[in-house]
Each structure stands twice: as C-alpha cells, then as structure tokens.
Image (cartoon, grey):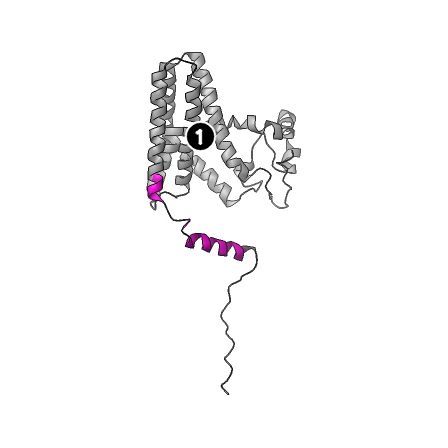
Amino acid sequence: MSPEPAPTTARVPRTTGRWSEYTQLSRQIKQAGLLDRRRGWYLARIGLNLALLAGGWVAFAMLGASWWQLLIAVYLAVVFTQLAFIGHDAGHRQLFRSRRANDQVGLIHANLLVGVSFEWWVAKHNRHHTNPNHQDLDPDISITALAFTTDQATAKQGLVRLIARHQAWLFFPLLLLEAAHLHLASTKAILRGSGRANTVEGLLLVAHVAGYVTALALVLSPLQALVFVVVHQGLFGLYLGCSFAPNHKGMPTSATPTSSTSCAARC
C-alpha cells in the first residue's frame, strides 16, 4: 500500500464569520464588474446634466420677471442635485483613474456649479466612511438640531432639545435648510483655509455666487428673487437630504467607549 499523504499545513481561507462573508460578497461584486469605472456613462451623464443646467437658465432668462419662475426654481433644484451627485462620485474617485481628473470634475461641479466646497465635503465624507454612524467620529450624525442616540438626545438643552424631541415630525422641514448649511459650512472652510488650492476653491465659490445673484438681480424683482432662492435652495437641500438620510436614520450607532442605542427613528 502507498503511504498516506502528509497532512497539509497550508492555511484554509475562512468561510464563516462576518468578515469572510463580506470578503466573498466583495469578490463577487468585483468579478461581476460592478466596480469597474464607466467613463463613457459618466461623460454622457455629465453632458446631459450640463445641457439641462444650461436649458434651465436659458428658460429663466426668457421667462423674465414672472412668478412662473418658481417652476424653474423647482427644476433647477433637481438639476443642482444631479450635479452634486457627480461631485460625490468624483470625491470617491469613481470617474477616472487620475486623482487630478476626479478633483477637477469635483471642483467644477461642487464649487462652481453648486456652490459647495469640494475639498471640505470630501474630507467630511471620508470621515463618515471611516467611522459610519459612530456618534463621536462620524460628522454626519453630529447635527445640532437632531439626535441619533439617547446620549445625544439627553445632552441637548432648550429649543434644540425641543426640536430633537419632535424631530420625526420636523425632519423634512429641517431638510429644507440643508443647502443653506452646506453653503455656510463651505464658506467657513474657505475662510479658515490657506494655500493655492484653497484660493482656487474660494474663487470658484465667488464665481458661483456672483453668477447666481447677478442672474436673479437682472431678471427678477427683489421679492421674486427672494422667493426663488427660498424655493430653489430649500428643495435642493430636501432632495439631497432625502438621498443621504437613509444611511443614518434609524440605523445602529456606536460610541467610545460604550455603545449607544439609536433613537433617530423615535426621538
């Protein structure tokens, strides 16, 4: 009889457990090509978005001083959000292999076309992905007016505590302020920053604001312009918030050193 083969000492990959399941799923997704860059699709989408943006502003100029401009405000809110989605994907380096190419697309879409600091948002978004739903480390669940854990809810005082207590009912009205928050945070980040890249970002933001305000001033009356901004920016923030909120709302959270129970669905 032939001798029995010697037992192998090679390590067998784990096939059970949370991380092995994630690894298997990740491999399946990559093998299916779902993570491959789709440059042609993105170029077509960018071209379509820019055409829709240009068409919206042309219609705005042709319509003149009319309250029908509020329909244009709704339309541009949708277009602005689609532009922001391209900026989001560029921040994830999904469009091109070159970091510079992704950054250039992100700067144009975020700073120039939408009015949000690309570098500030990328840094914040990366912290979110590094520590998702961690109440001490994820900036996306560190919001003054909202509580995502019982610890956050009990720590609030006064009007903010009252808002957090009724946040289930106030959630969508609060999202109307999201665009204003992004613009304000971007401005603060630019004013606090320094260097050539920060200067470029600042100039692009100034160009966005100057073009936006000039268009409103030349076409609309002061009251119409004010209402246009409220509708446009409010719906822009609402659309953005509704797109990203499901990543947090009612999801489990963690903290350091002890974990906290999520209360976003009930507080």
Drawn side of residue 190 relative to residue 164, left or right: left
Drawn side of residue 105 relative to residue 28, left or right: left
Q: Is residue 215 depicted above or below 132 in this figure?
A: above
Judge by depth and name the residue closer to the eye, 10 or 186: 10
- Residue 138 locus on image (x, y percent): 53, 40
Residue receiving disc 1: 186
Residue name at image x 38 percent, y 31 percent: 111
Q: Is residue 203 visible?
A: no
Number of numbered discs on residues: 1
Q: Is residue 87 depicted above or below 76 in this figure?
A: below
Q: Is residue 24 visible?
A: yes
Asked if residue 150 lies in the magenta stretch, the reply is: no
Region in magenta: 19-42
Q: Is residue 124 depicted above or below 8 in this figure?
A: above
- Residue 225 locus on image (x, y percent): 43, 16
- Residue 236 locus on image (x, y percent): 46, 27
Q: Is residue 257 depicted above or below 7 in this figure?
A: above
Q: Image quadrant of residue 92?
A: top left
Q: Image quadrant of residue 82?
A: top left
SS category of the residue bearing label 1: helix
Q: Image quadrant of residue 51?
A: top left
Q: Quadrant of the C terminus?
A: top right
Q: Report the predominant secondary structure element of the magenta stretch.
A: helix
Residue name at image x 35 percent, y 22 percent: 57
Badge 1: how crowded within 10 Å, few (<14), some, or many (20+)?
Answer: many
- Amino acid marked by disc 1: Ser
Judge by depth and name the residue closer to the eye, 222 or 139: 222
Residue name at image x 62 percent, y 30 percent: 168
- Residue 206 locus on image (x, y percent): 37, 25
